[in-house]
Amino acid sequence: MISSLQQSLIIVAMVTVGTALTRFLPFILFPDNRETPQYIRYLGKVLPFAVIGLLIVYCLKSVSVLSAPYGIPEGIAIGCIVLFQLWKSNTFLSIGGGTVLYMILVQFVFI
């Protein structure tokens, strides 16, 4: 599909408006001088864990434990992520290290 210049400009403008709206809306709805509602604080506590759980299920949905490599690279990478998190409590190190280890395992070890 080929878009005209006018269509492209409209798309860029709508994406810009949508991005700005999602960035500024929380500051408009919950300014510094008002207390944050209790349900927003609750969501801030529970949603990160729910999202991580959802990501884990999504990442492992196509892993077959009944055929080679039996989910071994995924298990090793998850174990590495847990160890990194327990050791350093650094999310970047945990996710980055686990991803690099997983890619090495599937590219060079479990071919």
Image (cartoon, rainbow, N blue to C red):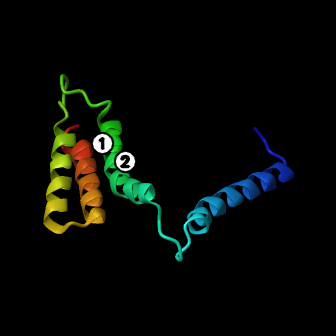
- Residue type highlighted by circle 1: Ile
Q: From the viewer's perspective, is residue 68 above or below residue 97? A: above
Q: Which quadrant, please, contains the N terminus?
A: top right
Residue depicted at x 14% and y 61%: 86
The reply, left or right, for residue 66 in relation to residue 14 is left
- Residue type highlighted by circle 2: Val
Q: Residue 81: horizontal and vertical position, in percent?
A: 20, 54
Q: Residue 58: horizontal and vertical position, in percent?
A: 35, 37
The reply, left or right, for residue 34 in relation to residue 44 is right
Q: Which residue is mark 1?
A: 56
Residue at the far top in the pictured view: 66
Residue at the far bottom in the pictured view: 33
Q: From the viewer's perspective, is residue 69 above or below residue 41? A: above
Give the label, 2 or 1, closer to the camera: 2
Q: Residue 21: horizontal and vertical position, in percent?
A: 65, 60
Q: CA distance from mark 2 to mark 1?
A: 9 Å
* Camera-side residue of 10 and 96: 10
Q: Which quadrant, please, contains the C terminus?
A: top left
Q: Residue 92: horizontal and vertical position, in percent?
A: 30, 64
The reply, left or right, for residue 56 in relation to residue 43 is left
- The quadrant holding residue 41 is bottom left
- The quadrant holding residue 18 is bottom right
Q: From the viewer's perspective, is residue 20 above or below residue 48? A: below
The reply, left or right, for residue 46 in relation to residue 85 is right
* Camera-side residue of 69 and 30: 30
Callout 1: helix, strand or loop?
Answer: helix
Residue depicted at x 27% and y 31%: 63
Residue depicted at x 84% and y 48%: 4
Q: Which residue is mark 2?
A: 51
Residue depicted at x 76% and y 58%: 13
Callout 2: helix, strand or loop?
Answer: helix
